């Protein structure tokens, strides 16, 4: 298959797969001209998690202002922005949420007579670290890069052989890492979203206070977090006087140990030229520190996205959209929203 010729200009990315309403304008070389993320955290906090119906309605209300702010931030007019293309997340995610951003992107592409690109949210996360480091253009980058893609809905260990070239090395057999953070935080009464709340509590705790299990630590590249979550519940039932800080720190350390072990094993298995973290859990400070140390021990570079680039945003969708537009061409306007969309893997 011959690739379409490179396209110049600016691409608008839209992300509405879960509870962040986001839009960004990015150049073909990965420069972020504007990025706007409107979080719905306050709307969902009272329920202890994302309520799909509320999320969909909130995207509808928030998206027009988010879009205007992103276009204005890039110095573009809403009526005729002169963009090269419009990209949006088509899955995976919540169906009602996905539909809002996807329909808007298609409508704008039609109105502005520019190509439309449907982007996989997981692929967006994979582009995030490399976008932040402009590593995609860096001659020193040696593929494959092994990525722990750890978010609220997914936990994958991926060997990235280049943009668009992914091999799945392992994945969670039950809960996602972020889901475990959210559930344990809710159980400890630390609030939502759980990741930042656990990290904050853990900072004042002893990570060795509870010997929580490290599931599948010495076993392949798959992950499992549901036993860990249950172990936390049992430990707190057995010791109701235990400090939240110690429980949070011990839980967090167990997750970090497992993720670092898997990334290192994956890197050794494929002879990786780099390590990388992606997804909301990649914002976790102790995880970032531990992966940096592991990369140092292995003598290979570590590509860490900024914390803002780890959690859901539209810059990563625009960056993945650019790559797709240039290498695979535009997407059909009847591309459906797919809540269970899988990462496109190498055969
Ligand atoms: O990638 P993301 O923004 O949305 C999904 O695609 O799921 O990830 C959200 C997840 C939530 O489970 C949240 O608790 C977790 O990422 N998270 C963190 C941190 N910040 C967000 N987990 C651990 N430590 C953090 N600092
Ligand atoms: Zn995400």
Image (cartoon, rainbow, N blue to C red):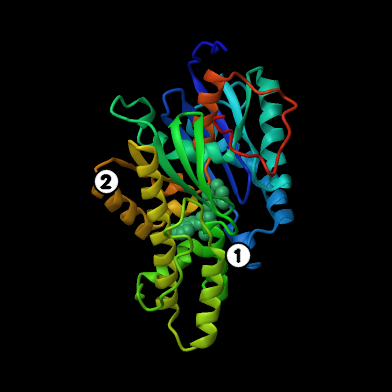
Disc 1 element: helix
- The residue at which mark 1 appears reads as 45
Residue 63 in view (yes/no): yes
Q: Which residue lies furthest to the front in this view?
A: 219
Q: Earlier in the sequence, mark 2 or mark 1?
A: 1
Q: In this view, does 83 lie above or below 69?
A: above
Instruction: Estimate the x, y position of residue 55 in percent, counting from the top left.
Output: 68, 52
For the point 57% across and 12% down, the residue is 1
Instruction: Estimate the x, y position of residue 260 in percent, counting from the top left.
Output: 38, 54
Q: Which mark identifies residue 298?
A: 2
Q: Locate the C terminus by quadrant.
A: top right
Instruction: Estimate the x, y position of residue 261 in percent, counting from the top left.
Output: 38, 55
Query: Image check: 90 left or right of 122?
Result: right
Sort mark 2 into few (<14), some (14-19) or many (20+) by Cα contacts within 10 Å: some
Name the residue nearer the viewer: 46 or 70. Answer: 46
Q: Which mark identifies residue 171?
A: none
Is the CB of the residue bearing disc 1 within 8 angstroms of ligand 1? no
Disc 2 element: helix
Name the residue nearer the viewer: 150 or 297. Answer: 297
Q: Is residue 279 above or below residue 31?
A: below
For the point 55% across and 24% down, the residue is 324
Nearer to us of marks 2 and 1 is: 2
Query: Image check: 333 left or right of 19?
Result: right
Residue 191 in view (yes/no): no
Name the residue nearer the viewer: 44 or 143. Answer: 143
Name the residue nearer the viewer: 69 or 42. Answer: 42
Distance, label 2 to label 1, CA atoms, is 40 Å
Sort mark 1 into few (<14), some (14-19) or many (20+) by Cα contacts within 10 Å: some
């Amino acid at each position: 298959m011959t690739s379409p010729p490179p396209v110049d200009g600016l691409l608008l990315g839209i992300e509405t797969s879960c509870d962040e309403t986001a839009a960004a304008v990015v150049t073909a070389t990965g420069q972020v001209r504007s990025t706007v993320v409107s979080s719905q955290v306050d709307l969902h906090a009272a329920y202890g998690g994302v309520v799909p119906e509320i999320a969909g309605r909130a995207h509808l209300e928030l998206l027009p202002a988010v879009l205007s702010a992103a276009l204005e931030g890039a110095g573009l007019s809403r009526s005729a922005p002169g963009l090269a293309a419009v990209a949006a997340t088509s899955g995976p995610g919540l169906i009602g949420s996905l539909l809002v951003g996807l329909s808007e992107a298609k409508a704008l592409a039609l109105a502005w007579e520019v190509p439309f690109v449907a982007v996989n949210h997981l692929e967006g996360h994979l582009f995030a670290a490399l976008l932040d480091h402009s590593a995609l253009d860096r001659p020193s980058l040696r593929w494959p890069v092994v990525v722990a893609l750890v978010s609220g809905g997914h936990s994958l260990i991926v060997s990235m052989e280049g943009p668009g070239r992914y091999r799945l090395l392992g994945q969670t057999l039950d809960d996602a890492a972020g889901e475990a953070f959210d559930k344990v935080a809710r159980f400890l009464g630390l609030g939502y979203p759980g990741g930042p709340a656990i990290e904050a509590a853990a900072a004042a705790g002893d990570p060795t206070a509870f010997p929580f299990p490290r599931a599948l630590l010495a076993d392949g590249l798959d992950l499992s977090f549901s036993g860990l979550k249950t172990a936390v519940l049992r430990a707190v039932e057995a010791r109701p006087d235990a400090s939240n800080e110690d429980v949070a720190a011990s839980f967090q350390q167990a997750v970090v140990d497992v993720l670092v072990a898997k990334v290192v094993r994956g890197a050794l298995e494929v002879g990786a030229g780099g390590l990388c973290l992606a997804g909301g859990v990649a914002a976790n400070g102790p995880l970032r520190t531990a992966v940096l140390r592991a990369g140092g021990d292995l003598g290979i570079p570590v590509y860490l996205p900024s914390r803002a680039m780890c959690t859901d945003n539209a810059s990563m969708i625009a960056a993945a959209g650019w790559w797709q537009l240039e290498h695979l061409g535009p997407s059909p306007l009847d591309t459906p929203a797919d809540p269970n969309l899988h990462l496109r893997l190498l055969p």
